[in-house]
């Protein structure tokens, strides 16, 4: 069975489109900061995510 060559990757700093089938990121820097503040205050990630409907799930 012949071995097909691997395609050559091209490195670029230009913005790339999202791959098809991949969801857009839901990352929100302000929400992340609020979560980090609560973690720094001693709250567990589980309690933050379960008690507050505005927070994402643990996973």
Image (cartoon, rainbow, N blue to C red):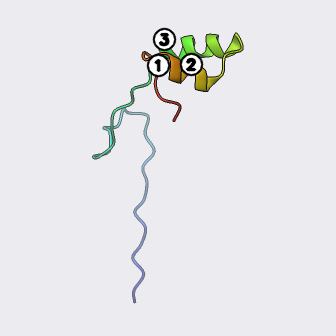
The residues bearing labels 1 and 3 have C-alpha atoms spaced at a distance of 12 Å
The quadrant of the rendering that contains the N terminus is bottom left
**Do callouts 1 and 3 mark residues in contact (Cβ within 8 Å)?**
no
Q: Is residue 5 above or below residue 48?
A: below
Q: Nearer the viewer, mark 1 or mark 3?
A: 1
**In this image, 47 relative to 22: left or right?**
right
Please report the residue visible at 43 percent of the width from the left and 39 percent of the height from the top: 12
Look at the numbered disc 1 and give the secondary structure of its residue. loop
For residue 55, the mark is 1
Look at the numbered disc 2 and give the secondary structure of its residue. helix
First in residue order: circle 2 vs circle 1: 2
Task: Identify which residue, 32 or 39, lies in the foreground.
Answer: 39
Residue 46 is situated, as x and y percent measured from the top left of the image, at 59, 26
Residue matched to label 2: 48
Mark 1 residue crowding within 10 angstroms, few (<14) / some (14–19) / many (20+): some
Q: Nearer the viewer, mark 2 or mark 3?
A: 2
Can you tell which quarter of the image residue 5 is in? Answer: bottom left
Q: Is residue 7 above or below residue 51?
A: below
Task: Identify which residue, 6 or 47, lies in the foreground.
Answer: 47
Residue 51 is situated, as x and y percent measured from the top left of the image, at 52, 18
For residue 30, the mark is 3
Look at the numbered disc 3 and give the secondary structure of its residue. helix
**Do callouts 2 and 1 mark residues in contact (Cβ within 8 Å)?**
yes
The residues bearing labels 2 and 3 have C-alpha atoms spaced at a distance of 15 Å
């Amino acid at each position: 069975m012949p071995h097909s060559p691997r395609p050559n990757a091209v490195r670029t700093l230009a913005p790339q489109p999202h791959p098809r089938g991949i969801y857009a990121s839901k990352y929100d820097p302000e929400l992340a900061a609020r979560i980090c503040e609560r973690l720094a205050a001693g709250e567990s990630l589980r309690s933050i995510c379960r008690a507050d409907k505005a927070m994402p799930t643990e996973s």
